[in-house]
Image: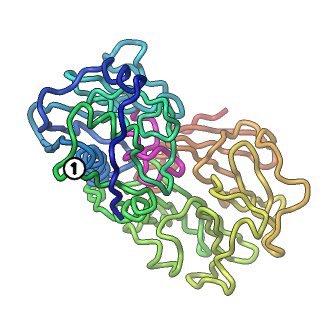
Amino acid sequence: MDTCIKTTKLTAQLKSRLLSGEKWQKKQLSYRILNWPRSLSTSQVHLAVSAAFQLWSNASGLQFLELHQGPADIRLAFYDGEHNDGAGNAFDGPGGALAHAFFPFRGEAHFDMSERWTLSGYKGHNLFLVTAHEIGHTLGLVHSPVRHALMSPYYKKISSNAVLSWDDITAVQQLYGKPPGDTVQQLVGRALRWTMQDWQISQDPRESSLTPNYCHGFFDAITTDENGAVLVFQGYRFWSVSNGSVSDPCLLQTRWPQLSVTIEAAAFNPLDRKLYFFKGRRMWRYSGSNLDPGFPKRSSALGLPKHVDCAFFYQPLGQLVLFKGSRYLVLNPRSLSMELYYPRPLRDWKGVPREVNGALTRPDGMLYFFKEQQYWRLDIGKLRITAAGRWADSLQWIGCQKTPSLLDNEL
């Protein structure tokens, strides 16, 4: 629901913040997206960026027009590392600086290509939210001292409240005036989450390429099924890879009815031949394509954390292992309870990084871990990493190449 906001009287602190920046001398501005991140389709990026600009136009006298070619007032681009902005502005890889922008009249916003950009914010950074913040800078706004403001210097996930705070709205209106009718149409976080689920169903033109879409970026989870096929999950879709052949992308709910639109982790247990899915605060269990009675279950009722990073079947224990942040735990699939003496530190798994996207055991007994575009192969018998590299280039069985690879980096 739209919320009307009334502007408050300017404080001296806010006035000094506004005077430190520049402003555009017009209220109709154009923008152009120069390229796209690897983890989202072009249409998804356009939807997120368009909504970010609309957020500011709904709160001020500004109007924005997207251009697909030629010069534009504001230009958005994704870069790796050094990109001719000076050494101090070079991007530092995943987990560091997300983006930066320039005040008028340069009108540029740069995003770190190596980050995992998402529409949800789970297992990555929300492109809409970061873009909206950087647009604020291109309009002349500096960082806000208000903790919950969009222009706060610290990245935050979308809450259930309005995206723009009173401080954000007051600042942009002092530069560009109020919107027509003097009424701010606020965007509320809880409604935005549902909208983003619709964005995830937008068509990706790269699906027509010779390799599956997940080969060009990241995936959310990976496991096998009861027939030994590798299942790769990305957003609302999954692919099945068997004997070097890759299926067309399918919606998760077409094969597993009542499952969440997207998932965060998946694991197949060969002992009970059941498939386990994890998303947010819930866990689903399927026998084939049938949801087992009593599922989904709340993670808290099972003693499990919310938003697990990955899940996999671990042969030496005959149980499921779940990673979450810097710790891991063991789930007994028979009693559906966490084993005693867990969680434990992730450093028990020497050489395995934190926040992996997924893991699975291959028929040869080797356990593979995946994070973004990299993989690590663990020899269960030796309990050490024996190979690592880029999975799309090195692992033929993941479906991203047609010929055997010699690219594994043996350790």
Above/below status of 279 relative to 131? below
Q: Which residue is label 1 attached to?
A: 182
Write the residue at 66% across / 41% down: 354
* In-image side of 263 versus 118 (left or right): right
Q: Position of residue 36 (x, y in %)?
A: 30, 42
- Left/right of residue 124 with respect to residue 174 in the rendered view: right
Above or below — where is 95 with respect to 53? Answer: above
Could you tell me which secondary element the residue under label 1 belongs to? helix
- Establish if 250 lies above or below 392: below
Between 119 and 93, the one lying in front of the other is: 119
Name of the residue lying farthest toward the right: 340
> Around disc 1, counting alpha carbons within 10 Å, would you say few (fewer than 14), some (14 to 19), or many (20 or more)?
some
Q: Quadrant of residue 330?
A: bottom right
Q: Residue furthest top?
A: 87
- Is residue 132 visible in the rendered image? The answer is no
Residue placed at 16% from the left, 50% from the top? 180
Query: What residue sits 59% from the left and 74% below the top?
Result: 227
Query: What residue range appears in magenta?
Result: 112-132
Q: Is residue 86 shown above or below 320? A: above
Residue 168, given in percent of the width and then of the height, sits at 37, 38
* Image spot of residue 103 (x, y percent): 28, 23
372 part of magenta stretch: no
Q: How is the image coloured?
A: rainbow
Q: Amino acid at mark 1?
A: Asp
